[in-house]
Image (cartoon, grey):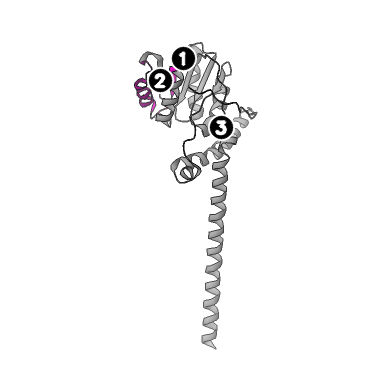
């Protein structure tokens, strides 16, 4: 009788472990599905692309993904979209300037703001520099999945400026994105966007979603 009870207890224990494993596998599958949905929905939910005018007052480049953003800003400058560039963000502001200079942007055309540590500070600390320069129109350069939050912050911080979004574009396949740190960055953008919306709402600012779907001219 004792042996039968021990066998039954062992079976019950194994059954509990099997259930836990099933729950774990199920949770992993759900998390993976949500992750892939976040990645595939990024272009529709997180990005803003505007048709650019022939000329604006300045190009604003956000730090954080230096090489690609520097290359985008330099291409816009060489296309004579704007005569000046403002680089904002600590960490890589000087390296972005160096990359742009190597790509043909003159040192005198670049202004640095190297104190801001996040997107809202980028917008806040850039505002007085833009106001002092009399900027009325500007192109914002950042990563494609960061554009909606960035353009919202800059519009709120400098409402007198007409903002246009010219993001760096996705170069990775879905698989490359899903298996890289960049995919994690994209997924983290969703809670960041929600958090920013809540904080701004608590300040009495309500964000109206902006839907700009026109393509940016090549060049």
Q: Residue at x 53, y 14 (%)?
A: 54
- Outermost residue to the bottom: 1
Q: What secondary structure is marked by label 1?
A: loop
Q: Is residue 131 left or right of residue 67?
A: right
Quarter of the image holding residue 155?
top right
Q: Tell me if label 2 and label 3 are in contact, CB under 8 Å.
A: no
Quarter of the image holding residue 78?
top left
Front-most of residues 181 and 77: 77
Q: What secondary structure is marked by label 2?
A: strand
Which-is-in-front pick, marks 3 and 1? 1
Q: What secondary structure is marked by label 3?
A: loop
- Does 54 appear above or below 179? above
- Does 149 appear above or below 29? above
Give the labeled residue for mark 1: 80
Give the labeled residue for mark 3: 47
* Residue 104 percent location from the top left of the image: 37, 18
Give the labeled residue for mark 2: 112
Q: Is residue 94 magenta?
A: yes
| Real-space Cα separation, disc 1 to disc 2, in angstroms | 20 Å
Front-most of residues 174 and 144: 174
For the N terminus, give its image quadrant: bottom right
Q: Is residue 143 magenta?
A: no
* Residue 122 percent location from the top left of the image: 48, 25
Q: Residue at x 57, y 45 (%)?
A: 37
Which segment is the magenta one? 78-106
């Amino acid at each position: 009788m004792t042996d039968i009870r021990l066998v039954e207890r062992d079976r019950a224990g194994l059954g509990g472990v099997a259930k836990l494993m099933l729950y774990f596998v199920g949770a992993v599958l759900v998390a993976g599905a949500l992750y892939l949905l976040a990645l595939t929905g990024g272009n529709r939910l997180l990005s803003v692309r505007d048709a650019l005018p022939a000329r604006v007052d300045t190009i604003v480049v956000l730090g954080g993904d230096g090489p690609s953003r520097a290359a985008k800003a330099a291409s816009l400058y060489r296309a004579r979209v704007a005569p000046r560039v403002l680089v904002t963000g600590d960490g890589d502001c000087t390296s972005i300037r160096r990359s742009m200079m190597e790509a043909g942007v003159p040192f005198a055309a670049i202004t640095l703001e190297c104190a801001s540590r996040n997107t809202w500070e980028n917008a806040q600390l850039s505002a007085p520099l833009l106001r002092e320069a009399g900027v009325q129109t500007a192109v914002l350069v950042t990563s494609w999945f960061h554009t909606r939050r960035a353009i919202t912050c800059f519009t709120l911080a400098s409402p007198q400026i007409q903002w246009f979004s010219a993001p760096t574009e996705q170069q990775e396949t879905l698989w490359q994105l899903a298996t890289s740190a960049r995919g994690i960055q994209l997924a983290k953008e969703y809670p960041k966007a929600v958090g920013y919306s809540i904080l701004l709402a608590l300040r009495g600012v309500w964000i109206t979603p902006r839907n700009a779907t026109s393509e940016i001219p090549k060049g």
